[in-house]
Image (cartoon, rainbow, N blue to C red):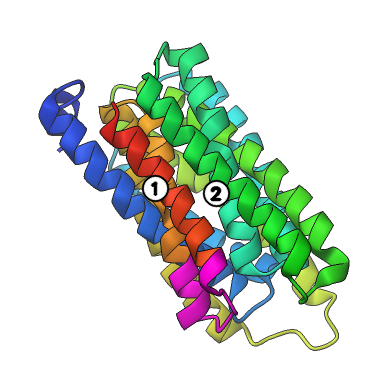
Amino acid sequence: MSDWLISLEGTEAGHTLALGLALAAALLHAIFGALQKGRHDPWLTRGAVDISYAMMAAPFAFFVVPFPEPHMWAIFGVAWAIHTVYKILQAQAYTKGAYTVVYPVVRGTGPLFAVIGAYLIFGEVFTTVQWLGVGVLLAGIFGLAIYNLIFLVAARDTLHMALGLAVITGLLVALYTTYDAYGIRATANPFTFLAWFFFFDGLVMPVIAYLRWRGMTAPPAIGPLMVRGVFGGVVAFASFGSIMLATRLDKVGEAAVLRETSTVFAALIGWLVLKETVGPRRIALMTLIALGAVIVEMGG
């Protein structure tokens, strides 16, 4: 399968497959975000998810995929550091704000900086129409942020902190998207990067989650938490794997922007599953973010 994927790089078939993978990653990432914000403390959920996918990845890393080339160890180390900071910020943002407030700002801020990073690192250039799409996307993001600042009543005392954390987390999203795209292109076999990345990436948050769980006066039962963790681990594999393969097959900036159609899925999940009040104006602003991503794809 690796040889087949590599043969599609830079081709029209590769572009089409990358488009499908980016859209799949959008839906899956919205589901993943809802899992972390849902029933349990977001720190505990993240720890359960991470230990699950680290254990799933271990046999593939050690016994299935080719062993990483020597230069990959430094790349894994930097990727691990970036993702660890990102996950801590993400969990803190979810602690301070509602899912439908935090998620769109996090996922919408990332693409602008990912596009800039793709230009600096990979030499990718956007057309005028694509930059128009980025502008539409940003209008939706900042419109949503302003709307929340004016009208949101729930968790008002921590809203400014939640939005600030969401913007900073979005910067980390752009950083890890660009750097991971570099990493998956730096090894001969893309599945080598994915297997070892998931193994290393899952080793920190479980420790933080355990310390937090142990300090709770009424800690939740481990069983239901780990069920959510295993399901989240599978979703994480599919979501992150899809977007990383998309960035190897085609342009990093386009894949990063298209993935942000996840904001529409997030609105639906927040409304239907988490029972959060979304409202027509916030849905319209989230849709504007997704529309910007579509314009970027169509203008390429």
Q: Residues within 10 Å of mark 2 (few under 14, many from 20)?
A: many
How far across and down, in percent of the image, does residue 118 sit? 46, 21
Q: What stretch is highlighted in magenta?
A: 267-281
Q: How crowded is mark 1: few (under 14 residues within 10 Å), some or many (20 or more)?
A: many
Q: Which amino acid does label 1 sit on?
A: Leu
Which element is circle 2 on? helix
In this rendered view, identify the residue nearer to me: 232 or 158.
Answer: 158
The residue that disc 1 covers is 291
In this rendered view, identify the residue nearer to me: 274 or 226.
Answer: 274
Quarter holding residue 139: top right
Residue at 55 percent of width and 80 percent of height: 274
Q: What residue type is labelled 2?
A: Gly
Please say whether residue 270 is one of the residues in the magenta stretch.
Answer: yes
How far across and down, in percent of the image, does residue 214 sit? 80, 75
Residue at 59 percent of width and 79 percent of height: 276
Labels 1 and 2: the sequence-earlier one: 2
Quadrant into which the N terminus falls: top left
Question: Is residue 177 visible in this depiction of the protein?
Answer: yes
* Circles 1, 2 touching at the beta carbon (< 8 Å): yes
In this rendered view, identify the residue nearer to me: 221 or 245.
Answer: 245
Q: Is residue 153 above or below residue 220?
A: above
Tell me if 215 is positioned left or right of 113 in this view. Answer: right
Residue at 39 percent of width and 16 percent of height: 124
The residue that disc 2 covers is 140
